[in-house]
Amino acid sequence: MMSGLDLERLVLAAGPLGIMQACLDVVLPYVRQREQFGRPIGEFQFIQVSYEQHIFFFQFSCTFFKYMNLS
């Protein structure tokens, strides 16, 4: 009974990972294109840190998902 739930959890975890990837694919060009105060917003430290954190959490989630898939 519980082994079926493990497979279901893996399948359901793949959806949010795909959504995260799609969001990152949309955000990077936007950050490079959008300007504020005459500079692209990607040059601002807050945006850089925020984007780096999102990339880190996405990569961590993918690695965790692959690890759980192998177990």
Image: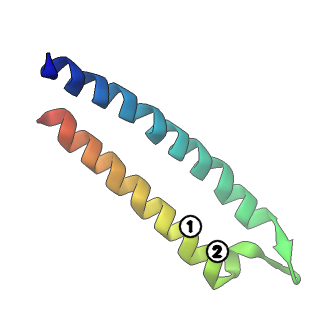
Q: Nearer the viewer, residue 3 or 25?
A: 3
Q: Is residue 44 left or right of residue 36?
A: left
Q: In terms of depth relative to the viewer, which is nearer, 4 or 54?
A: 4
Q: What residue is shown with label 1? A: 51
Q: Are marks 1 and 2 in contact (CB under 8 Å)?
A: yes
The residue nearer to you, when weighing 37 against 3, is 3
Q: Is residue 53 left or right of residue 62?
A: right
Q: For the residue labelled by badge 1, is the local secondary structure a helix, a strand or a loop?
A: helix
Which mark is drawn over residue 47? 2
- Could you say where residue 61 lies in the image, as x and y percent from the top left? 35, 50
- Above or below, 63 against 11 in this view is below
Residue at 71% in and 65% down: 31
Task: Look at label 1 and name its amino acid.
Answer: Tyr
33 left or right, relative to 25: right
Q: Tell me, for residue 24, which label it has, or none.
A: none
Point out residue 65 in the picture as x, y percentages from the top left corner: 28, 42
Q: Position of residue 48 (x, y in %)?
A: 59, 75
